[in-house]
Image (cartoon, rainbow, N blue to C red):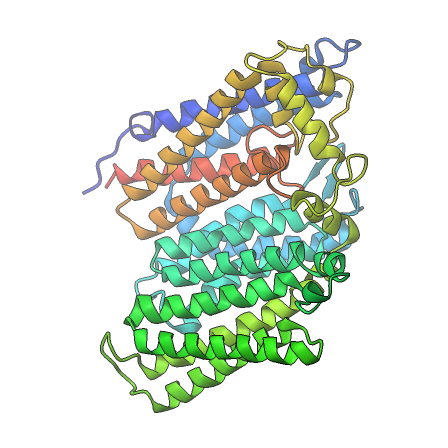
Amino acid sequence: MIRRQSISNTVDWPAIFIYILLIAMGGMSVFCATYNPEHPLAIFEFGQKAGKQVIWILCSGVIATSILLINSRIWETFSMIIYTALILLLILTIFISSGHKGSHSWIDIGPFALQPAEFAKFATALALSHVISRYDFHLKGFRNYAIVCALFLLPMVIIIAQNETGSALVFSSFFLVLYRKGMPGVLLFLSFLAIVLFIIVIKFGDPLAESLSQNTFWSSFGSIGLLVACILIFLTVVGFLLVFHHDTESVWFLIKILISTIVVALAINYFFSLSYCLFAIAFLLFVFAWSVVRAWRAPISSSIRTPSRKFFSLLAVFTLSATLYSQSASMAFNVLQPHQQSRIRVVLGMEDDPKGAGYNVNQSKIAIGSGQFIGKGFLNGTQTKLNYVPEQETDFIFCTIGEEFGFVGSFLVLFLYLLLMIRIVQIAERQNEEFNQIYGYCVATILFFHFAINIGMVIGLAPIIGIPLPFFSYGGSSLWSFTIMLFVLLRLDASRLER
């Protein structure tokens, strides 16, 4: 039975209150970051950035109110149409964009510019929720995984073609939604392992090997990064055997082969100089061949003590894939643009470039650190006022909070984000329709990814990839897209009480 109630009685007011606080503080931060003594009332001058931000905030209020008044069923009904329209718009943007700092992801509309990639996150969240929530859909089998992955990989590829790598990486956060809806945790672990292997191979690759090559003993190791990667791959294989099937017999067999390989490698290098990486790769190829043989001999089904044919087949695929991936990580790194490579090297501590790739992060740390506990005070920040921090009103907007309001202000902002994300998860958990629940998880993961990466960029824990801070960074596209995402969720949640 439908119980019609006023939207004011069903909407989640705590989430709206946090949202209002964040956009108010965001508007204030843009004003502080762009403050010019010649325009002390810039928030009332719509030709100034602070004034434009006020317009976008007011428009966000209109958008939020309109969404709350629209029938909630429209979002699920037209989810795939909205997704298709955004995909076509992303493709069109490549050809009609005039270019903005090397990126072809912006569409000029008079004095303003919109970035469709921001709204594509919302559209993808709707499409993913629609597909997974279908009554005949189960997150099992290659076909279904291919369908859901294609939904967020397609816009990801198009946005990369726009030369907007940062926005494209946000779509990888949807893997967390798949995990929440039944994706095996081992796939999430393998994704994390891929990142770790990439970092190890890049950070401890050729430069370290070359620096040690003067020593005849170390010169035989070749790339230390590749050697460590091979060790991690073997430890993962051992972990799979022990965790999933408690197969200690196979583990001891592989350890004996490993010891034999080490002995042979030491003996050969006593007479000849060969890279130990070659022996490590040879050992992993043996593990692959051994897994193939075990898969051929194993039964189709098995108990916990006797691994099945499927298990050893997957083990063989993992061993070979991980080995090839580790060997090609350096080539994949070289595909990145020079400035992207340099930023990653700075974050990994491979190079120190305070006047080049590391300039932004270095100035950001100085600005935040100079704020100390309570900050320098409203409009008293020197780093931001003198424009020492590049992009201080967009990607590095958090520097303004840190410098002018110190640890206290920074903690308050982080606490509000944490409260909002917790509230979104709570809203998602209490939904009685799967579409609403999955959409809530999508909003939470996108918000978390933006928040974590942006703060990580500002304090030097993540490479600079151009991701705005939700509700704070200057610009209408980001503010409107997050407003739409949040208030669609609030409208879906409000409709829950009408049924």
Q: Residue at x 43, y 39 (%)?
A: 488
Say above or below: 13 vs 44.
below
Residue drawn at x 50%, y 59% is 193
Question: What percent of the width, then of the height, locates residue 87?
Answer: 60, 56
Residue for point 80% across, 9% down: 38
Residue 102 relative to residue 277: left or right: right
Quadrant of image for the C terminus = top left
**Residue furthest out toward the bottom:** 297
Q: Is residue 158 depicted above or below 380 in this figure?
A: below
Tell me residue 73's x, y (percent).
Answer: 37, 46
The percent coordinates of residue 108 (x first, y second) are: 75, 40
Relative height, residue 211 to residue 446 (above, below): below
Based on the displayed image, in which of its 4 quarters is residue 15 positioned? top left
Q: Residue furthest front?
A: 270
Report the label total.
0
141 or 414: nearer the viewer: 414
For the point 18% across and 43% down, the residue is 1
Give residue 403's quadrant in the image. top right
- Res 91 visible: no
Name the one closer to the observer, 23 or 179.
179
Q: 482 and 81: which one is in front?
A: 482
Q: Position of residue 374 (x, y in %)?
A: 55, 12
